[in-house]
Image (cartoon, rainbow, N blue to C red):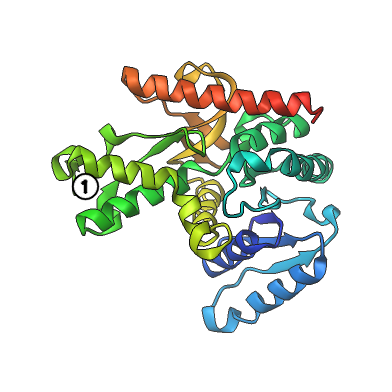
Amino acid sequence: MPKKVAIIGAGKVGSTLAQVLMYKNLCDVILWNRTPERAIGIALDIMESAPVEGFQTKITATGNMADIAGCDIVVITAGVPRKEGMSRDDLLKVNADVIGSICTNIKTYAPGSIVLVLTNPLDPMVYLTKKITGFDREKVIGMAGILDSSRFAEFIAMETKTGPKTVSAMVLGSHGDLMVPLVRFITVNGKPLSDVLDKTKIDTIVERTRNGGAEIIKYLKDSAYYAPASSLALMIDSIINDKRLTLPCSVYLQGEYGVSDAFLGVPVMLGGKGVEKVVELELNDDERRAMAASAEKIKQLVGELNKLGV
């Protein structure tokens, strides 16, 4: 019997993720939306492509949170998307209210699930998810580092005129201005990035990666959704099929990387139980300072939530 994944929010990311999961034949999907008519229309449209695409899994639409009962994974994509001129942090209070209501229902109806969070500002929202659900840290995970790493790798591939699969890149830290691209670890066709590009070009790519979401918004007048959906699908695949891929995700740290009581993007092994292991890389002094700055910013945002009584 296929695993069941609930997607909370049938906006552009949620609906695209549903399509990707169906086309990959990964799992059955429960697509929840506050206005169920939208979820029903999207589910019907996707299922009408089954005879063409050949997938056997099913998608069900609902506006009733009770229908997520029994789901193995719950993915939160709901929330107010970032608009042009906004930072991810600008969404703090409004999306905290959205997350609060959703997580109360997850705790009630899907207490055995693994929860993946996409809603911005990502790291504080994952923290809030864990706080409200009370789930173990292995079962509450934020998606950001995979997306940032994918953007970084693609920008490098564009600059070096190579295929994206020839670039090995990883971005850690917060999902925002203080993300930490690990330039020292990046390779292109097995060669260190510093052997392929000069420092000026590397710095330009790092800055473009930090502003990758804003660049999309500038053109679309809306937040990205194709790459985020693909990144979430990779996490779901690794969990459902117990692949134990090492992927950069936002997880609750308890001393790893010198950080405690905060969610931060680090490499983790994702398997059937969620976070199977936090992978600790040997960072240099500059990288450790950058990670500490990321963690401090996240703790400040969580502190703002606490002041607001969230």
Residue 118: give x, y in percent of width and height: 61, 47
Q: Nearer the viewer, residue 30 or 307?
A: 307
Q: Quadrant of the N terminus?
A: bottom right
Identify the residue shown where x is 81% and y is 59%: 34
Q: Residues within 10 Å of mark 1 (few under 14, many from 20)?
A: many
Residue 144: give x, y in percent of width and height: 51, 43
Q: Quadrant of the C terminus?
A: top right
What residue is disc 1 on?
Answer: 188
Give the left or right position of residue 212, taking residue 306 as reference.
Answer: left
Q: Nearer the viewer, residue 279 or 261?
A: 261
How many callouts does the rendering have? 1
Identify the residue shown where x is 54% and y is 83%: 52
Q: Secondary structure at mark 1?
A: strand
Q: Nearer the viewer, residue 36 or 299?
A: 299
Give the left or right position of residue 213, taking residue 129 as reference.
Answer: left
Residue 108: give x, y in percent of width and height: 84, 41
Whether residue 222 can be seen here: yes
Extreme residue toward the front, this view: 85
Q: Nearer the viewer, residue 297 or 185?
A: 297
Compared to residue 310, the image places residue 146 above or below, namely below
Q: Quadrant of residue 261?
A: top right
Compared to residue 289, the image places residue 266 above or below, namely below
What amino acid is labelled 1 in the image? Val
Q: Quadrant of residue 164?
A: bottom left
Whether residue 282 can be seen here: no
Identify the residue shown where x is 51% and y is 39%: 176
Compared to residue 48, the image places residue 39 above or below, namely above
Q: Quadrant of residue 300?
A: top right
Residue 208: give x, y in percent of width and height: 38, 47
Compared to residue 249, the image places residue 161 above or below, namely below
